[in-house]
């Protein structure tokens, strides 16, 4: 165990977010997302929600400030009469760590799957909310220059 690291972040997940480089993407998915069939690297976090994992990860993972939308959501399929209230929760979590954050990119379902196939990793949770999948694009940790 280490001090200050949320216990919800497994050693495997910490290793993955440490390995990611600027511009790499990671998916945090709900329990219905086809993570195993789309992932190059899959991390199972079945007993947790997307919001819990998102909050813990963003303590350490900077979002890409050089793109218009460093976070993306799977848009609701036309005709599916659902309003994902969880998106407001995501916005609150993201802006807590990234105050300059503006808007989520909305990605059509099958385009989201294609991005997931190219993502560095997929974190599958036990989230039960519909349309609870999120893509995060890693940014740069800015170091202060020495004298």
Image (tube, rainbow, N blue to C red):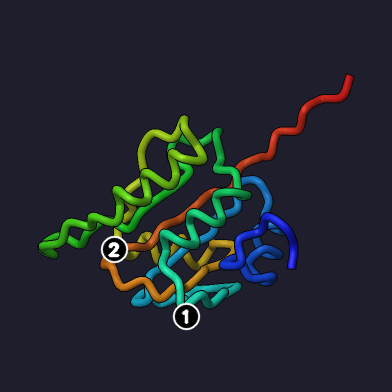
Which image quarter is the N terminus in? bottom right
For residue 92, above or below residue 111: above
96 lies left or right of 111: right
Vertical arrangement, residue 11 with respect to residue 17, above or below? below
Q: Find residue 110 and report its image quarter.
A: bottom left
Please name the residue shown 10% across and 62% down the image: 81
Depth-wise, is mark 2 or mark 1 nearer the camera? 2
Residue at x 23%, y 55% (from the top left corner): 85
Tell me the residue at 71%/65% (across/down): 15
Q: Is residue 126 left or right of residue 83?
A: right
- Quarter of the picture containing the C terminus is top right
Given the current orientation, which residue lies at the most extreme front position?
3
Q: Are marks 2 and 1 in contact (CB under 8 Å)?
A: no
Q: Which mark is residue 131?
A: 2
Residue 43 shown left or right of residue 100 in the figure: right
Tell which of 6 and 54 is nearer to you.
Answer: 6
The percent coordinates of residue 127 (x first, y second) are 36, 71
Q: Residue 69: percent from the left, percent from the top?
A: 43, 40
Q: Is residue 111 above or below residue 124?
A: above
Q: What numbered label is drawn on residue 87?
A: none
Packing grade of label 2 (10 A; few <14, some 14-19, many >=20) is: many
Q: CA distance from mark 2 to mark 1?
A: 18 Å
Please rate how many residues cluster around mark 1, counting C-alpha atoms within 10 Å: few if below 14, some from 14 to 19, many from 20.
few
**Nearer-N-terminus badge (2/1):** 1
Q: Secondary structure at mark 2?
A: loop
Q: Using the rendered view, name the quadrant where residue 65 is placed.
A: top right
- Residue at 41%, 67% (x, y): give it: 49
| Residue carrying label 1 | 37
């Amino acid at each position: 165990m280490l001090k200050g690291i949320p216990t919800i972040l497994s050693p495997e997940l910490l290793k993955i977010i440490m390995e990611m480089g600027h511009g790499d993407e990671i998916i945090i998915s709900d329990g219905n997302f086809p993570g195993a069939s789309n992932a190059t690297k899959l991390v199972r976090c079945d007993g947790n929600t997307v919001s819990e994992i998102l909050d813990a990860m963003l303590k350490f993972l900077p979002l890409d400030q050089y793109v218009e939308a460093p976070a993306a959501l799977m848009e609701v399929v036309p005709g599916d009469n659902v309003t994902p209230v969880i998106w407001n929760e995501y916005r609150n979590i993201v802006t807590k760590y990234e105050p300059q954050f503006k808007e989520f990119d909305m990605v059509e379902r099958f385009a989201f799957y294609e991005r997931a196939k190219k993502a560095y990793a997929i974190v599958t949770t036990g989230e039960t909310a519909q349309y609870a999948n999120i893509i995060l694009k890693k940014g740069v940790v800015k170091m202060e220059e020495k004298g």
